[in-house]
Amino acid sequence: MREKPREHGYYDYPVVKRPVWTWEVPVYFWLGGIGGGAFITSSLAQRFGSDEDARSLADGFYVAAAALLPCTPLLIMDLGRPDRFHHMLRVFKPVSPMNLGAWTLATFTPVALARAAALAADRGLLPKVAAILTDLVPRGLTELGGSVLGITLAGYTGVLLAATNIPLWAKSKLLGGLFTASALASGSAAVSLMAALRSAGDGPLHRLSKIESAASLAELALVAGYIGQSGRTARPLTAQRRALPFWLGAVGVGAVMPLLLHRVAAKRSGVRLRRLTTLASLGAIGGSLALRWTVFEAGKESANDQAASFELSS
Amino acid sequence: MDPFRRLMNLESPPAPRGVKGFFTDTSLCIGCKACEVACKQWNQLPADGFAMTGNSYDNTGALGATTWRHVQFIEQAKENGNPNEQRWLMMSDVCKHCANAACLEACPTGSLVRTEFGTVYVQQDICNGCGFCVPACPFGVIDRAPREGSFEAGTAHKCTLCYDRLKDDMTPACAKSCPTASIQFGDVAELQRRARARLGELQARGETSARLYGMPEGKEAAEVGPLHAFFLLLDKPSAYNLPEVPRLPRKTMAERYGWSAAVGVGFALISALAFGRRSR
């Protein structure tokens, strides 16, 4: 039987190459986002919060240090030649998001570690010698500089994926903003999780609850904008194998559920407030991983979508 | 050499030696795949295994880390409805060596460079296999070799325009082996002149479907610039899996970062309000 000539395309071969990256990348994006978001949240609490806020919401510096430690190993593991990781730092080339990200990670990690060490010293957890060293860390300057690096780390990952020709990643302009919102939501959630577990007072938890709600709301708005702008191109994410983890995990558990729980938590106090906060925080943190993972994996399928590639480049 | 470069042990880049490229005239291609074979031999690229795709004579499939020339076979029924009248288009695809190359801009190590011949080249001793150039290329050309392989494992590969041969004033292997002059090598400006003349000739003979792809005035040069390896096609670009307007990711990057920054600033403002600027 004679086939009709194809309207577009060379057989069903993809136009662009499928990304070679593996699971390390979304996990790194997730942890980097939490690290950046938590550092920023704690820094803002130090700068603008009450004494109680500053005291009970400082754990974000620990969270940032802990989340950032595995990031560099993950980034190295994903390379085709892990022994050459340092070649990333032989040039400074911010036009390449990958280069900008490597530099940001390489500078933010020591800053976050120094601030965490300073916090530990302030709490009397370090031996005298180390405490003298941490006195050299200028707290305010470290927080300001670290916050700039942190927002860069949280924000560049979405732009990195979008600065490709993968239709799902590149069609909408909002992926960078979406990943940033998700990073700030999960980072601030990690701070409130630590505060709730350490039985912080109601005041700081209520105030942080408002901030987390704003981040989740922004995330939902950006998801809507991202899906809307992507149109048909978003199908590998919204309608195929990744649909359930995306809608239920990233959107439902990651943003809608925390938003509802925070509304309830606004009228609660004490143990019930801390329980609600804990649940909301776990949801936001888990949802953030679901978002990175589904967008990442669906992007690989989108690379095979010949029609979407032609639509993107028309 | 200036003292700074000497101090930093920096080599001066080689002096420019003209802008070289390919003009691939698909109206002359007979699908012999001599270019594929010559490329593999000269560049010592390993075989990709025997696999039948079932898609005409194309058992290569796509360009990749170890395939730098790829001959496409496009079988088209003619519009008059006679099943015995088919049109068979052949096209030897290759890295386009874009004037504004997405892979080169994406590369975080500076491994991908513009050579003295105006070509885009991966320095194998620098590439750390980050893989960012792979999805950045709008044509799906460059790819990373598997980590467990015998051939420069784990790094990115694509056509070098036979950089080693150019150094010695030799013609790249594919162009040298092409028996019909479908692949022509030379100075891009001269090739463009030749391509325009050839297009005029074909159109005068009634081949109205002929068109050039990758010329400076073409729609496809809007973002990636003129292609240093450009084509004469006999159908619309998408029939050859070529994008109508190949995208350069840098063009929209500032706007994308803008959204990230806006979210960050918004978060800081809302946090400042929520914490209430309590004086300490």
Image (spheres, coloured by chain):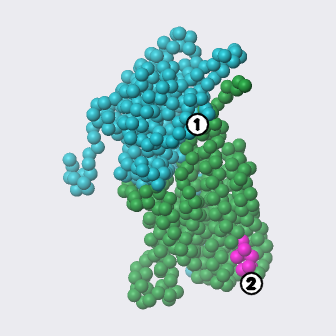
CA–CA distance in space, label 1 to label 2? 66 Å
Callout 2 environment at 10 Å: few (<14), some (14 to 19), or many (20+)?
few
Say which residue appears at 62% left-offset and 33% top-offset.
B54
Residue type for callout 1: Met
Disc 2 secondary structure class: helix
**Measured from the top left, where is residue B208 in percent x and y?**
57, 15
- Chain A drawn colour: green
Left or right, B9 with respect to A189, comes to left
As drawn, the residue found furthest toward the top would be: B205
Q: Look at 55% across and 71% down and name the residue there.
A: A67
Q: Which residues are magenta?
A: A273-280
Give the label on residue A139, or none.
none
Residue tagged 2? A271
Q: Is residue A165 visible?
A: yes
Q: Amino acid at mark 2?
A: Val
Please identify which colour was used for chain B in the image.
cyan
The foreground one among B261 and B100 is: B100
Q: Position of residue B167 (x, y in %)?
A: 29, 36
Residue B67 placement (x, y as % from top left): 47, 39
In the image, residue A219 sits, relative to residue B90, either above or below, namely below
Q: Which residue appears farthest toward the front when viewing the image? A: B50
Q: Quadrant of the C terminus of chain B?
A: bottom right
Give B178 or A176, whichever is nearer the viewer.
B178
Compared with residue A10, is residue B202 higher up or lower down, i.e. above or below?
above
Secondary structure beneath dot 1 equals loop
Q: Chain under label 2?
A: A
B231 is within the stretch colored magenta: no
- What residue is shown with label 1? B52
Apparent side of residue A179 relative to residue A101 in the rendered image (left or right): right
Q: Which SS does the magenta portion mostly show?
A: helix
The local crowd at label 1, few if under 14, some if 14 to 19, many if 20 or more residues have their Cα within 10 Å, is few
